[in-house]
Amino acid sequence: TNGSGAEAINLAELLNKASFLGGSSSEESQRALLQLSQALASGTLQGDELRAIREQAPGLTDVLAKGLSSMAERGALPEKFIGTTMGDLKALGAEGELTAGRVIAAFKEMGTYVNETFDKSPKQFGQAITGIANVWKRWLKLMSQGDNALSKINEKAWQLLEWFESTDGMAFMERLAKGINFVVDAIMQFIDWI
């Protein structure tokens, strides 16, 4: 039904946001979400899949633990879940307590927390680059339409964009960011010294 489709989309967005809260990179988040989806499809979250999620997306497991605890506090889960921490998840998983239904309910329980925390958190560098790339692509599409005078630069601009999205381009941007941080730190130390 349309309702369940919208619910699935909302859950996917929530999980995606939660995976970034612990500082995970895009690749780590994607791997963790793949492991989580496999676990949910199998019916329980445990073993290697749980370990992988804990390592690659600590924000995801933190939200899961808080959600389980919150549900227990209001009586929706047994008392043993009250005060659940990330460290408790391994034992709960081994006991088969992390069923797909409970895991999904725990994430939904924390929906407001995840959205508010995500909105307040500083945008990550990779997210900013993705946002810039999306705007850039829309602009290039407009520029390439019709007989626009600027359409002549379109091909070169696309080549530049593809390079920025390549491994070399991302590595260059990360080195540039680190270099800028280094210079700023050096200036701050110099000011402190003076």
Image: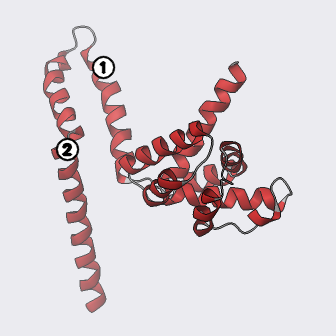
Q: Residue at x 17, y 51 (%)?
A: 172
Name the residue type under label 1: Lys
Read off the residue under disc 2. 167
Question: Which quadrant of the structure image shows residue 63?
Answer: bottom right
- Residue 161: x percent and y percent? 22, 34
- Whether residue 15 appears in this view of the structure is yes
Q: Residue at x 82, y 64 (%)?
A: 79
Question: Which quadrant of the structure image shows residue 182?
Answer: bottom left
- Residue 177: x percent and y percent? 25, 59
Q: Is residue 88 left or right of residue 130?
A: right
Look at the picture and state if 67 lies above or below 152. below
Label 2 CA crowd tier, 10 Å (few <14, some 14–19, many 20+): few
- Residue 110: x percent and y percent? 68, 52
* Residue farthest to the right, as pictured: 75
* Residue farthest to the front, as pictured: 95
Look at the picture and state if 66 lies above or below 152. below
Q: Is residue 12 left or right of residue 96?
A: left
- Residue 136: x percent and y percent? 31, 32
Q: Is residue 48 left or right of residue 171?
A: right
Q: Nearer the viewer, residue 146 or 25?
A: 25
Name the residue type under label 2: Thr
Read off the residue under disc 1. 141
Q: CA distance from mark 2 to mark 1?
A: 24 Å
Q: Nearer the viewer, residue 90 or 110?
A: 90
Q: Earlier in the sequence, mark 2 or mark 1?
A: 1
Q: Are the residues at dot 2 and dot 1 in contact (C-beta closer than 8 Å)?
A: no
Q: Nearer the viewer, residue 155 or 82?
A: 82
Q: Residue at x 42, y 43 (%)?
A: 30
For label 1, the SS is helix
For label 2, the SS is helix
